[in-house]
Amino acid sequence: MRCGDKQSCQRWFERELKQAAERLEFMRDTSHTLGPEIRVERERRLDELRGRLNRGIARLEALRRANGDNWRTAAVHADEAFAALTEALLQFDRQTSALQPIAA
């Protein structure tokens, strides 16, 4: 776990999930520079990543709603969801780094 109390966990996950959402939006915006066959596959993968982001957001909401010491369990689940999102983003970057945009 990345934090010592519930509020700092919430702030950390909020910040990290916001950055991941911005990164996904940028990736989606730049996908139009690819050829149609590559773009379709990339959009499908971006949809999968959006699903992972949504799971992370749901885990953050569970953390917000957790009472008492239950926040620690919720934070572990949020951390797992964020780690899965981060790994999926890195894998996506590795797989798409070889793709070149089409000439304008």
Image (cartoon, rainbow, N blue to C red):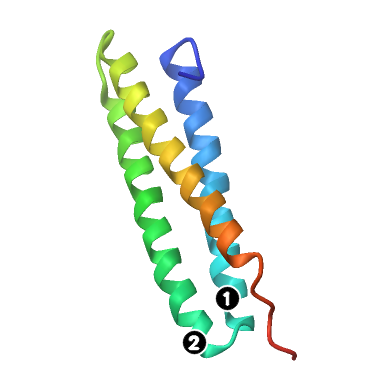
Q: Earlier in the sequence, mark 1 or mark 2?
A: 1
Q: Where is residue 73 in the image (x, y as percent from the top left)?
A: 29, 18
Asked if residue 55 lies left or right of residue 91, the reply is left
Residue corresponding to mark 1 = 31
Residue placed at 25% from the left, 15% from the top? 67
Q: Which mark is residue 37?
A: 2
Q: How far apart are marks 1 and 2 (CA)?
A: 11 Å
Residue type beneath disc 1: Ser
Asked if residue 9 lies left or right of residue 23, the reply is left
Q: Where is residue 96 in the image (x, y as percent from the top left)?
A: 59, 66
Residue placed at 49% from the left, 72% from the top? 42
Asked if residue 93 lies left or right of residue 81, the reply is right
The answer to whether 71 is drawn above or below residue 12 in the figure is above
The answer to whether 88 is drawn above or below residue 97 in the figure is above
Name the residue nearer the viewer: 45 or 25: 45
Residue placed at 44% from the left, 45% from the top? 85
Which quadrant does the C terminus fall into?
Answer: bottom right
Q: Where is residue 98 in the image (x, y as percent from the top left)?
A: 66, 69
Name the residue nearer the viewer: 14 or 24: 24
Residue type beneath disc 2: Glu
Element at label 2: helix
Which quadrant does the N terminus fall into?
Answer: top left
The answer to whether 60 is drawn above or below residue 7 in the figure is below
